[in-house]
Amino acid sequence: TRRLMPALRIAIIGISGCGKSTLAQQLSEQYAIQYFKIDEMYWQENWTLRKSEEFCELVAAAIAEDRWVIDGHGASAKMLIWQRATHIIWLNYPFVRVFIQLLGRTIRRAWTREVIFSGNRESLRQSFFSKDSILLYMLQNFLAKRRELRGYFEQYPELQAKVIELDAPMPFEFLLQQLAPSRN
């Protein structure tokens, strides 16, 4: 008889640059599950935001399956994602660590002109000399986003039970143990 795979729906959250996409890719490969990128659903070409209704429809279709990982909390779709998730991994790393990671990633992407999603690329001008800078966003929103996420989990205790909060990178094997189904 064919053994059914247990449901595994993982939402990875945290501020920009904390490592959500990297971890999501690793978990997708480890568990052979679909990986959805919030930014691909949220942003269209030329850094144009998708309409909220359309974005929520894309997210709902993505998370309808029983096995997936998604990187990001998805603004207007976060509760939809979190309620469906079996696990929420919160990369709640210290400011300095995240800023250094984000700075390195931003410089690399701007220098190589890497296509990130929807044909969009980061540029040195946009990253360092623009009000739309991802670095400026992180600097201005780091503490507020942390408080906002903590507030959601305090307000919705049913979500709290799903959260694996990491304040420092853990060995991958440790994280896999946290995701393993309980053996009660």
Image (cartoon, helix red, strand yellow):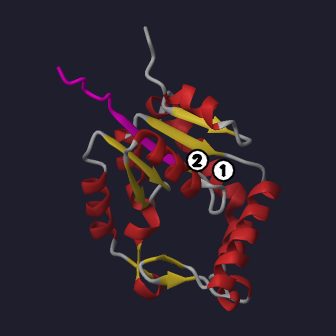
**Is-magenta flag for residue 147?**
no
Amino acid at pointer 2: Leu
Q: Work out which residue is located at the far right of the displayed protein and give it.
A: 96
User: Taking 126 as reference, is 62 above or below it?
Assistant: above
Residue 143 versus residue 89: which sits nearer the camera? 89
Amino acid at pointer 1: Arg
Left or right: residue 49 versus residue 61 is right
User: Taking 20 as reference, is 44 above or below it?
Assistant: below
What residue appears at the point 45 percent right and 88 percent down from the top-left corner?
46
Q: Determine which quarter of the picture holds residue 53.
A: bottom left
What is the quadrant of the C terminus in the image? Answer: top left
Left or right: residue 142 versus residue 90 is right
Percent position (x, y) of residue 147? 65, 49
**Labels 1 and 2 touching (C-beta < 8 A):** yes
The residues bearing labels 1 and 2 have C-alpha atoms spaced at a distance of 5 Å
Percent position (x, y) of residue 56? 31, 61
Residue 104 versus residue 154: which sits nearer the camera? 104
Which residues are drawn in magenta? 1-12
What residue appears at the point 69 percent right and 37 percent down from the top-left corner?
170
The residue singled out by tag 1 in the image is 146
Left or right: residue 31 versus residue 172 is left
Residue 152 versus residue 71: which sits nearer the camera? 71
Q: Work out which residue is located at the far top of the displayed protein and give it.
A: 184
What is the quadrant of the N terminus in the image? Answer: top left
Secondary-structure class at tag 1: helix
Which circle marks residue 94 in the picture? Answer: none
The residue singled out by tag 2 in the image is 149
